Image (cartoon, rainbow, N blue to C red):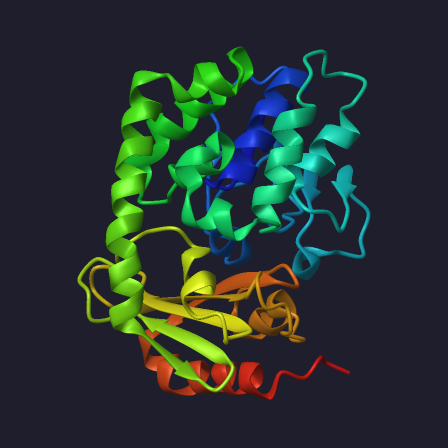
Amino acid sequence: MRIVTRPDFDGIVCAVLICEAEKITESIKWVEPHEIQNRLIEIKEGDIMANLPFDDRCSVWFDHHESNRIGSAYTGSFKKAPSAAGVVYSYYKGKIKRDYKQLVKETDKIDSACLSIDEVLHPEAYPYILISMTVSNRGVTEEPYWNRLVGLLMKHDITGVINDSEVKERCRAVVEENRIYKTVLSENTVLNKNVSITDLRSYDKAPEGNRFLVYSLFSEAVVSVRIRYDDPERQKIALSAGHNIFNPKCRVNIGKMLSKFGGGGHKGAGACRFLTSRAGEYIPQIISTLIENRPEE
């Protein structure tokens, strides 16, 4: 039996909960949604998938992304909820003996971006938020850390986790990274009416940082767009978008809209990947839809 999930904080907490509830016999398989959508990953009988689009080859499936809702029968649970971890926790409530209520509550808050301006500007004062920022998909070299975090969250409270030597060092690095990223956003973001557009295609490797920071810097925007190359050869582009959590006037269902471009997500945030050759067509369409700011019929 194997867990297949996404390498973000919600996916990590899903893995913690499933490990507590089931007899997992194989290493966690960490994948991105587009790898499932394009059937690039072998999914097999016995796999428990969480926080990812449905694959009919799996045995159990959990998710909460509106764009991933399916009409066919399956084993598991889908709910429109703040986090996939919350869906998993509710499903396994009778099998999980340890109290994970606070962890799930914080995961709900982080994954649904229900944060205050102080939490965004000073994550170092909020341990759950800071630890979530140490989880970044920068390739398979990060897998040992994701697995380490799963193990730590199963054994320790948040104080014990954040005092782990590797976690502590990554938290320190995140604080410095966010400081630099604030300058990157200021220099590479433009406002197009109600949309802030951060274009990082001039970088060989797109800078990482606090994904909520742009909302505090460009408060007049109701939605943000972030564009970067997704591979060293610059053959693919990754585009993400999100409602401004401090100016909640965007009426576009982001996940539903981006599903038309090979992506998906929540109503308030999502992402897609496409060939660079489609950029001239796709990016203007996406930005135009966001500027119009009309809910779909």
Residue 203, position in %: x, y? Answer: 19, 65
Q: Residue at x 48, y 41 (%)?
A: 8
- Picture quarter containing residue 75? top right
Q: Is residue 188 visible?
A: yes
Residue 127, position in %: x, y? Answer: 47, 30
- Picture quarter containing residue 102? top right
* Left-right relation of 99 to 149: right
Residue 35, position in %: x, y? Answer: 47, 52
Is 207 above or below relative to 90? Answer: below
Q: Residue at x 31, y 43 (%)?
A: 139
Nearest the viewer among 53 and 208 is 208
Give the position of the C terminus as an image quadrant: bottom right
Nearest the viewer among 272 and 249 is 249
Q: Residue furthest front?
A: 118
* Left-right relation of 24 to 193: right
Q: Is residue 59 visible?
A: no
Is 60 above or below relative to 100? Answer: below
Is 219 above or below relative to 122? Answer: below
Nearest the viewer among 51 and 209 is 209
Residue 277, position in %: x, y? Answer: 33, 80
- Picture quarter containing residue 91? top right
Q: Residue at x 62, y 83 (%)?
A: 293
Total labels drawn: 0
Give the position of the N terminus as an image quadrant: top right
